[in-house]
Image (cartoon, grey):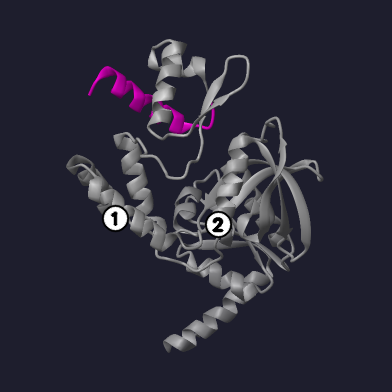
Amino acid sequence: MTETSGRLLKLLALLQTRRDWSGRELADRLGVSGRTIRRDVERLRELGYPVDALTGPSGGYRLRAGTAMPPLLLDDDETVAIAVGLSGAASASVTGIEETSVRALLKLEQVLPAHLRRRVNALRSATAPLPPTSGPTVDPEALTVIAAACRDRERLRFGYRSRDGADSRRRVEPNSLVNIGRRWYLVAWDCERRDWRSFRLDRMERPSPAGTRFAARELPGGDPATYVTRGFSDAKRFAAEQQRWQARIILDATAEEMRERFPTIWGSFEPRPDGRCDFSTSADELDWIAVRVATLGVPFEVLAPAELRDAFGRLAIRFARAAGVALG
């Protein structure tokens, strides 16, 4: 490969990694002059790549969408990441992606070098996927519209249905997309409510660019995933406070052990100075709390409410009868 051909491939790879590049940035990355960059861009255009020139003090370039997709230039790590991602996409929550991802994976595997195919197969064999689950899916076109608005810092507008079924119109400054389990969330600044919000994409209707750009705001805490999961915790805490019974139990196990073994949706595990932990949980029925605690499988002591002890007594009688054991 000649020096010029190699440089053209590197230039094309750079143009594919982000939306806009200044001429000076490209020249610095490739170690050439601005004049050389201009010549190389002309060569790419002659080869059919739609590279647009940008106006401004230092000029710039953008690889726009053309009538056909140009070959993607990927390094080894990028190729492995895409192959593994496609192989796991069958359990994703994007409408129609299962069949599409299989077709794309077959095409990619046909051209993988042997050493990359071995890496992909090793990663697949060492990964245990979660079983497919049902749930709402997201329109892939809506997903790409939202992702582009996040990237370009362009305001979005959409209809939204809240958890309680209320419909509203929203205009937001999108920050990030977050995928948790089979749910997609958008973290954004709500322009009317003047505060940060997270929106479930399957509850959004017809998201579209509003046509105006915005300056990036600082997200509280800095991490979008943490912001979304903190909202889960606040919602669960609020829901728990609405339950009739609030229970507190001492467990003969560490908080770390219990958090690893059981979902936090059951309640919270907090460490005690003696190495045990407090388990706080709530429900409208005491018998359900008693069953939940018994399922934890460790010795325990009821702190509150006192009525929970009676619930354990009732369950003990039922279980003994089922087991054919006579209680004295």
Label whose residue precedes the other's in the sequence (2 or 1): 1
Residue ID for mark 1: 106
Query: Is 51 in the magenta?
Result: no
Secondary structure category for the residue under label 2: strand
Is 53 placed left or right of 168 in the picture?
A: left
Residue 270 shows in the view = no
Stretch of the chain drawn in magenta: 1-20
Which quarter of the figure has residue 28? Answer: top left
Q: Identify the residue at horizontal 29%, vertical 23% (top origin).
A: 6
Q: Are marks 2 and 1 in contact (CB under 8 Å)?
A: no
Q: Which residue is mark 2?
A: 183
Left or right of residue 294: residue 5? left
Structural distance between the alpha carbons of marks 2 and 1: 27 Å
Task: Answer whether residue 12 is magenta in the image.
Answer: yes
Along the line of sight, the residue nearer the viewer: 301 or 263: 263
Dominant SS of magenta comes to: helix
Residue 298 pos. (x, y %): 46, 62
Q: Give the quarter of the figure containing the N terminus.
A: top left
| Residue depicted at 60% across the width and 73% down the height | 288
Q: Amino acid at mark 1?
A: Leu
Q: Is residue 14 above or below residue 220?
A: above
- Residue at the extreme left: 114
